[in-house]
Image: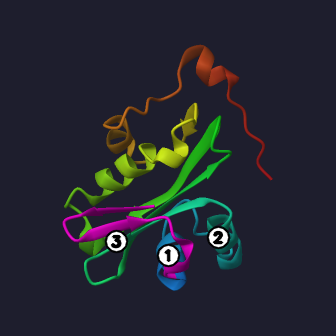
Amino acid sequence: MSWLRHGFEINTDKTKLDRESILRMLRATYWASEVPPADLWESILNSRAYGMYSPDGEQAGFARVVTDVTRFAWLSDVYVLPVHRDRGLGKWLIETVINDPALAKVHRLLLSTNDAHALYKEHGFTTLEGEEATKMMTLLR
């Protein structure tokens, strides 16, 4: 799948991904800095990946979704390169992911963020509260 806006492209073709650029950006994040590069790349290859490319073809952003494409999806590793920020590209990336026809049947889309709640709330995400929050569990290894 491919989406175009203002010369930028979002594409799900994993052969177009710039491995080194993506790994460099993810290694600089709070959520993936401790993950070995080989494991990061394997996680990308086993997910639905969304590469964002600038008009000159540079890897400008990225997101991935771990999913069974029917009931559940986990949105992860979302970023836009600093040089391309403040243009609405992050909003467009999230909008593209949640409206991707390949994910249309997904009932529950989850994510975890330390600092981007406002961005995701703009797209309909809510924090888990009450009974819903008490149902969620995790196993960390």
Quarter of the figure that contains the N terminus: bottom left
What segment is highlighted magenta in the picture? 1-18
Q: Is residue 97 above or below residue 11?
A: above
Q: Measuring from the top left, give residue 36's x and y in whole percent.
A: 68, 75
> Horizontal placement of 44 versus 6: left or right?
right
Number of numbered callouts drawn: 3
Residue at screen point 58% across, 36% down: 106
Residue 114 part of the magenta segment: no
Q: Measuring from the top left, give residue 68's x and y in whole percent.
A: 68, 45
Amino acid type at mark 2: Leu
Q: Are marks 1 and 3 in contact (CB under 8 Å)?
A: no
Q: Which residue is mark 2?
A: 40
Determine the secondary structure under disc 2.
helix
Check residue 81 in the rendering and tell me which mark sits there, or answer none.
Answer: 3
Q: Which residue is mark 1?
A: 22
Alpha carbon distance from label 1 to label 3: 10 Å
Q: Residue furthest top?
A: 131
Q: Is residue 138 above or below residue 1?
A: above
Residue 113 appears in the rendering: no
Residue 8 part of the magenta segment: yes
Determine the secondary structure under disc 3.
loop
Amino acid type at mark 1: Ile
Alpha carbon distance from label 1 to label 2: 9 Å
Amino acid type at mark 3: Leu
Q: Are marks 1 and 2 in contact (CB under 8 Å)?
A: yes
Q: Measuring from the top left, give residue 18's x and y in whole percent.
A: 49, 81
Residue at screen point 31% across, 37% down: 122
Coloured how?
rainbow
Residue at screen point 64% across, 70% down: 40
Q: Is residue 6 above or below residue 102?
A: below
